[in-house]
Amino acid sequence: MLHLIFQSPIETAILERIDSGDVVVFLENAVLRVLQNSSISDTLTHQLSNNRLCVLSDDIAIRGITLDELINGLEVIDYAELVELTVNNPVIQSWT
């Protein structure tokens, strides 16, 4: 399953619904929550062992976020890679 998270702040209940093997993409203001100093950084770091966590490059650039501010292990993807994820994952859940 592909999870598209737009919501900020990100509710813990959303993170609890992500199953092992799911792919998560943080978009728009949700990218503000994937910083190393965020309140959910420990939870997301733990989820990296079972999930692919991504952030859209344009969304971090617009907000002035640098790569070294992101949680280690997070993948930075572009729009083409986002489209590829949507094609390869028949089930998509958007969290707004």
Image: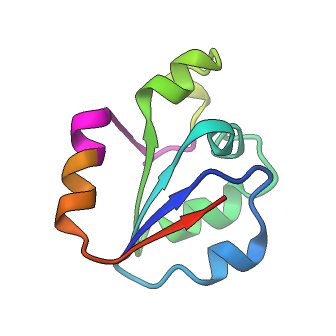
- Above or below, 22 relative to 69: below
Quarter of the image for residue 44 reads bottom right
Please state which of residues 70 and 19 is positioned toward the viewer in this rendering: 19
Q: At 70% from the left edge and 54% from the top edge, which residue is drawn?
A: 7
Quarter of the image with the C terminus is: bottom right
Instruction: Judge whether residue 72 is colored magenta.
Output: yes
Q: Position of residue 23 (x, y in %)?
A: 38, 66
- Above or below, 71 relative to 58: below
- Above or below, 83 relative to 16: above
Q: Position of residue 49 (x, y in %)?
A: 42, 70
* Span highlighted in magenta in the image: 71-82
- State how many labels appear: 0
Q: At 25% from the left edge and 75% from the top edge, which residue is drawn?
A: 90
Q: Position of residue 94 (x, y in %)?
A: 53, 64
Quarter of the image with the N terminus is: bottom left
Instruction: Judge whether residue 19 is colored magenta.
Output: no
Q: Please, which colouring scheme is shown?
A: rainbow
Q: At 60% from the left edge and 37% from the top edge, which residue is drawn?
A: 28
Q: At 70% from the left edge and 37% from the top edge, which residue is drawn?
A: 32
Q: Position of residue 25 (x, y in %)?
A: 46, 53
Quarter of the image for residue 60 reads top right
